[in-house]
Amino acid sequence: MSKNSQLITAATGAAAALGAYFLLAHTKCTASLLKCPCSGKKKIPEGTEVKLYYYKATGLANQIRLALAAANIDFTDEYPTGFPPSAEDKELWKKIGGNSTTNVPMLTIGDKVYTQSMAVMKVIGRKANLLPKGDDEYICDKLLADAQDFRTAAYKSFVTWGADQKTADDFIQNVVPLHFGNIERQLKEAKSTYFIGEKLTIADISIYDAIVNFGTSRLPEDVMGNYPALKAFVAKVEENPGIAKYLKSEQFAGLMKFDKSTLGY
Ligand SMILES: N[C@@H](CCC(=O)N[C@@H](CS)C(=O)NCC(=O)O)C(=O)O
C-alpha cells in the first residue's frame, strides 16, 4: 500500500469514528438535551432547579410545559394551593418576576427569571435547539403570534368566565374554522412534517397547544376531519418522546384542563 493510500485509509477511519461518536452523542442528546454533546456545551448545568410558576391548570403555561417536556428538561410546577390565588401568592409572583403587572406563567432556571409566555418559549427554544435560525426565525415568531391570536380569541369564549352562549357558539362556528383554516393553510404550504422543515420547533409546540388545549379539547364535536393535515400534525407532535411521556405523566394528569363545559356543553 502506498503512503498516500495509507494516509487516506487512516483519515477515512478517523472520520468514520468521529461520525459514529456524534451519531451516538446525538442519540444521547435526544435523551437529555440538557447536556447536548452535539452542541459541545451544556445548555443548563446539571442540578439546576427549573420551576414553572402558574395556576394548577394548563392555560397559558401549557405550551411552556410541553416545550420543556420536548427538551427533556425536568421541572416542578409551583402553584397556589387555592383558587383564586391569595394576595400573598400574587405578592410572591411579583417579587420573583419583578413586573408590577402579570408575571405568570413564569419560568425560573436557577436564579434566572423569565416571564411573558412567548419570550419564555424562545428561551427554551434557544437552550434546547428547538428554535429555527435565519429567515426561519421570522416564520417561527409569526406562528407563535398566530397561535397567540387564537388563544386570545378563545379566552373570550369561556362561558365559565362570563361569556354568553352566543359568543361561545360563534367561537365554535366561526372563530375555530377561521383560525384552524389559516393555520392548516400554512402547514400545507410548508410541505413538510412540521411547520418549519422536518424538525420539531417551538412553533409546532405552540400551535399544537393552541389547537388542542384552547380548541379541540373544548369543542362539543370532533371537527378535525375537516382539517386532515392538522389532524396528522397533532398526532405527530404527540409522538415526540418527551411530549408523549409528559402527556402520560401524573404531573400533567394533576392539572385542571379546559373541556366542553367552557363552551357551555
Ligand atoms: N402576556 C402574558 C399574559 C399573562 C396572563 O395574562 N396571565 C394570566 C394567567 S393566564 C394571569 O392570571 N396572570 C396573573 C394575574 O393577572 O394576577 C403572557 O403571555 O405571559
Image (tube, rainbow, N blue to C red):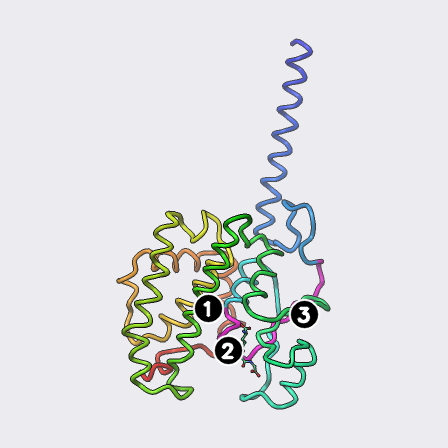
In the rendered structure, does residue 19 fall within the stretch colored magenta?
Answer: no
The residue under label 1 is which amino acid type?
A: Gln
Q: For ligand 1, tell me if the residue under mark 2 lies within 8 Å.
A: no
Q: Is residue 116 above or below residue 56?
A: above
Question: Marks 2 and 1, how far apart in space?
Answer: 18 Å
Q: Is residue 170 above or below residue 124?
A: below
Q: Circle 1 is placed at which residue position?
A: 148
Q: Mark 1 or mark 3, which has the lower sequence index? A: 3
Q: Quadrant of residue 94?
A: bottom right
Q: Quadrant of residue 126?
A: bottom right
The residue under label 2 is which amino acid type?
A: Ala
Residue at the image position 30 percent from the left and 64 percent from the top: 224
Segment tinted magenta in the rendering: 45-62
Q: Is residue 55 above or below residue 31?
A: below
In the rendered structure, does residue 56 fall within the stretch colored magenta?
Answer: yes
Residue at the image position 43 percent from the left and 53 percent from the top: 195
Position of residue 265 measured from the top left corner of the image (x, y, whole percent):
31, 83
Q: Circle 2 is placed at which residue position?
A: 57
Q: For ligand 1, tell me if the residue under mark 1 lies within 8 Å.
A: yes
The residue under label 3 is which amino acid type?
A: Val
- Give the residue at the far bottom of this rendering: 87
Looking at the rendering, the quadrant in which ligand 1 lies is bottom right
Q: Circle 3 is placed at which residue position?
A: 113
